[in-house]
Image (tube, grey):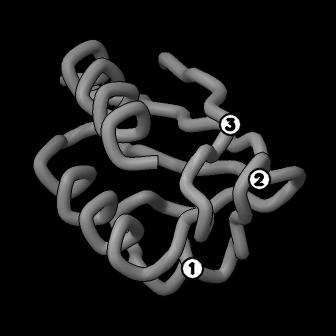
Amino acid sequence: MKSFNYVINDELGLHARPAGMLAKEAKKFQSKITITKESKTVSATQLMMIMSLGVKKGAEVTVTVDGADEDEACAAMETFFKENL
């Protein structure tokens, strides 16, 4: 299992467009990818669940990747967050 923390820099937080892109990116991997904000954890492949976190600018999230391709998936998720959020 691999994980990383990320502080959201996007002015609008984790809103619909990047959340949709995130879910699409997460679906490319076999590993289970989750996002945790405070005590709530959701699957990164489910757009509505990501939106339910209500992540605003400055909020810290933890992304956890567990599975067969976790190294590749974690690296891709970290790059996605840095480039889009």
Residue at the left extreme of this rendering: 28
Q: Nearer the viewer, residue 42 or 80?
A: 80
**Measured Cα–Cα span from mark 2 to mark 1:** 11 Å
Label disc, if present, on residue 7 of the rendered structure = 3
Res. 81 image quadrant: top left
Label disc, if present, on residue 37 of the rendered structure = 2
In the rendering, at what x and y percent does residue 3 appear? Answer: 55, 22
**Measured Cα–Cα span from mark 3 to mark 2:** 10 Å
Res. 76 image quadrant: top left
- Label 2–label 1 contact, CB within 8 A: no
In the rendering, at what x and y percent does residue 39 appear? Answer: 88, 54
According to the image, label 1 marks what residue? Answer: 51
Looking at the rendered structure, the kind of residue marked 1 is: Met
Residue 58 in the figure: left or right of residue 63? right
Looking at the rendered structure, the kind of residue marked 3 is: Val
Query: Which residue is found at the position 57% from the left and 79% from the top?
Result: 51
At mark 2, the secondary structure is: strand
Does label 3 or label 2 sit earlier along the sequence?
A: 3
